[in-house]
Image (tube, grey):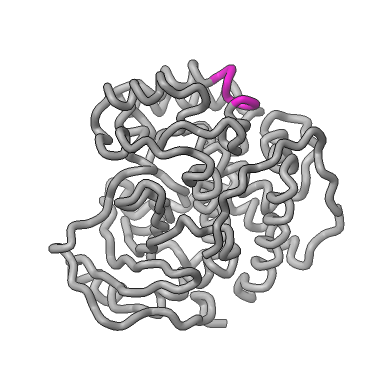
């Protein structure tokens, strides 16, 4: 199952893929009165401010090596999402995404469903408020409330089975974000759990307290000149939304793991022919295979850090013999992320559906 599948190519596309201003026109929707706020069980039926900047740790933090209650589930999550395990075949790899419904997020609740016009075969899913709520409730069961004040919208979409499982994008306010989940791909909790943590990692590392949004780029997503100007004015890593803070997670990650290879990677990323770009990216991955936890990690530094965070959460602490393992150890520099890892694992153990 691909996570945040949209690949990043030319300058404008780099920005739009995970920061597009994709808020839908009001005239295309019919708003309904009911509010969806009640809590319910996972799909199978069985706002605080987060503005503090990450501290810089001089030495690695040691944590308990004792196995947690459901370490076997976490191990299966990692195995299911590994490149070696492979992915199910897509029903239609070229299918376009169709937004089914989106909600306003208020803390742990989703409210005010707004529906887009959908083909007849999606109307049943569109009316299934319980399904929407169950997807949302599993996400909030995993991720603590205080870690997601930037999340203001939630939407359910589909692009067919086994394509993009989930993504995050900025809303019409560059400081706010929307989580999008494909209703066709939520039946496998091993994929879903890993993917939701991956998408949360984008929120964790790209929110406005970590990366200052560029209004010029946000308001002109197709203007390469504005994008280039914003990059040239940035003394730190520019992930797409804006200039990263010097003490941000993404800037530290870039400095440690991407500074030496970014120029080589970016030349591939700017290749106009998608087939040539994909082939060259494959060669790049083979050349630096010991530096990446998955092939998908090579698609962009923001995907690399999000993949590494998911492995940090679900994998045992590695020895750090390879650069790929060092990317997992990167997060152990931050006491607050160690605590967050333990919270997510505890939440996963409590809420993962019984087999």
Q: Which residue lies furthest to the left in this view?
A: 27
Counting every numbered tag in the picture gives 0
For the point 67% across and 73% down, the residue is: 350
Pinpoint residue 72: horizontal percent, then vertical percent: 73, 62
Residue 333's place in the image compared with 273, above or below, is below
Q: Which of 160 and 337 is in front in this view?
A: 337
Q: Residue at x 50, y 22 (%)?
A: 235
Region in magenta:
255-261
Residue 205 percent across, percent down from the top left = 54, 43
Residue 220: image x %, image y %?
A: 25, 35
> Residue 325's x, y, as percent?
71, 36
60 or 290, nearer to the observer: 60
Residue 45 included in the magenta stretch of the image: no
Q: In this view, does 193 lie above or below 125?
A: above
On the image, which quarter does residue 49 sit in? bottom right
Seen at 30% across and 31% down, the residue is: 12
Q: Looking at the rendering, in which quadrant would you find the C terminus?
A: bottom right
Indicate whether residue 259 is drawn in magenta.
yes
Asked whether residue 260 appears in the rendered view, the answer is yes
Is residue 63 shown left or right of residue 94? right
Q: Residue at x 61, y 34 (%)?
A: 247
The answer to whether 137 appears left or right of 353 in the picture is left
Residue 276, visible in the rendered structure: no
């Amino acid at each position: 199952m691909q996570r945040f599948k949209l690949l990043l190519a030319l300058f404008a596309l780099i920005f739009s893929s995970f920061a597009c201003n994709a808020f839908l026109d009001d005239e295309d929707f019919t708003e309904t009165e009911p509010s969806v706020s009640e809590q319910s069980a996972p799909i199978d039926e069985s706002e605080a401010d987060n503005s503090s900047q990450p501290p810089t740790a001089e030495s690695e933090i040691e944590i308990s090596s004792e196995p947690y209650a459901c370490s076997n589930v976490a191990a299966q999550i990692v195995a299911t999402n590994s490149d070696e395990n492979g992915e199910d075949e897509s029903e239609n790899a070229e299918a376009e995404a169709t937004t089914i419904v989106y909600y306003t997020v208020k803390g742990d609740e989703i409210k005010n469903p707004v529906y887009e016009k959908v083909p007849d075969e999606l109307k049943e899913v569109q009316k299934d408020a319980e399904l929407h709520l169950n997807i949302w409730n599993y996400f909030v069961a995993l991720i603590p409330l205080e870690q997601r004040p930037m999340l203001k919208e939630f939407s359910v979409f589909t692009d067919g089975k086994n394509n993009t499982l989930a993504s995050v994008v900025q809303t019409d306010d560059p400081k706010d974000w929307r989580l999008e989940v494909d209703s066709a791909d939520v039946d496998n909790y091993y994929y879903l759990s890993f993917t939701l943590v991956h998408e949360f990692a984008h929120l964790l590392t790209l929110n406005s307290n970590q990366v200052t949004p560029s209004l010029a780029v946000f308001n002109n997503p197709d203007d390469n000149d504005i994008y280039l100007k914003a990059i040239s004015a940035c003394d730190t890593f520019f992930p797409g939304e804006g200039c990263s803070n010097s003490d941000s997670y993404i800037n530290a990650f870039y400095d440690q793991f991407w500074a030496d290879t970014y120029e080589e990677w970016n030349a591939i990323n700017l290749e106009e022919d998608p087939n040539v770009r994909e082939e060259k990216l494959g060669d790049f991955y083979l050349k630096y295979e010991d530096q990446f936890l998955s092939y998908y990690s090579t698609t962009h530094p923001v995907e690399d850090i999000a993949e590494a965070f998911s492995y940090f959460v679900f994998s045992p602490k590695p020895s750090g013999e390879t650069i790929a393992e060092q990317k997992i150890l990167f997060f152990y520099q931050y006491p607050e992320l160690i605590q967050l890892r333990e919270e997510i694992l505890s939440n996963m153990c409590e809420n993962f559906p019984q087999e």
